[in-house]
Amino acid sequence: MTILFVGCSKDELNGSPEELNQQDFAGISAFNAIEGTENLQLLVDDKVINRTDENFQTGGYLNPRTIFPGDRKLSLISPKGHIYYKGEIKTVASKFYSIFFYGQLNATVMTAEDDFIKPANGKQKVRVVNLVSEGNLKLSYNYLNSQESYDFKERVLAYKEYVSNEKITFNLSSTDGKYEAVKFEFDGDDQSINTIVFYTDLNKETSKREIKYKIIENK
């Protein structure tokens, strides 16, 4: 499990989310859930947007950065020139988007609009994203005195607000027995905006595909 703390620097965003709302730009970030990959390059309109110190590997995340809105060409390639994805993304000025790549040699792409409006004091926002390309999954989570479940008919469980000083216990199970269950507790910071991403990768020691998860926390 990895927790990524994400800030929006001026070098990447030309300002904060609030300033972006007043500019003619859109914001994008990206998550790589393509199995067994390293140092992939993300291109927008044929220009690489990775920084030189960013290894966009499996489980890797590129912080938000600005692009011009509208229909933009999008490509994801390996250092050896393999094209994992080539297509377009449509964006609107003043909005933020997360681009999720998942699968294997021919990647599938999913785009979700982000919410950077901070919750009230004592609250946190949590969104859950399923990038496991194969298998039937069920997510159960305990919060306060209740238990809820979700069968991932849609890959994104939209943002929900929770009390920030209460732990949430997540349990992701494979109803067809394809993967081992994943269970963990989450305790986000006050007024944080969090995305929990589930994805798969090969265990190099056992050569078995495993479910992993990453928590992206925006402050």
Image (cartoon, rainbow, N blue to C red):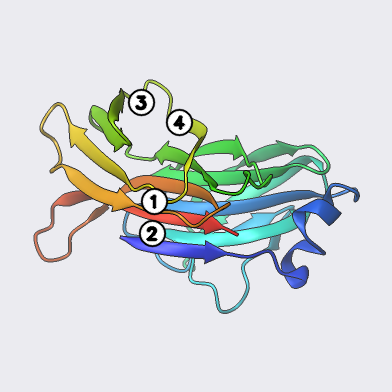
How packed mark 1 is, by other alpha carbons closer than 10 Å (few <14, some 14-19, many 20 or more), is many
For marks 3 and 1 on the same chain, the one whose residue lies earlier in the sequence: 1
Q: Residue furthest bottom?
A: 53
Q: What amino acid type should be assigned to the residue bearing mark 3?
A: Phe
For marks 4 and 3 on the same chain, the one whose residue lies earlier in the sequence: 3
Mark 3: secondary structure: loop
Mark 4: secondary structure: strand
- Residue 118 point in image, percent of width and height: 65, 47
For marks 3 and 2 on the same chain, the one whose residue lies earlier in the sequence: 2
Mark 1: secondary structure: strand
Residue at which label 2 appears: 58
Residue at which label 1 appears: 34
Foreground pick, 49 / 94: 94
Say left or right for 55 vs 103.
Answer: right
Q: Quadrant of the N terminus?
A: bottom left
For marks 4 and 1 on the same chain, the one whose residue lies earlier in the sequence: 1
**Residue 157 tag number:** 4
Residue at which label 3 appears: 152
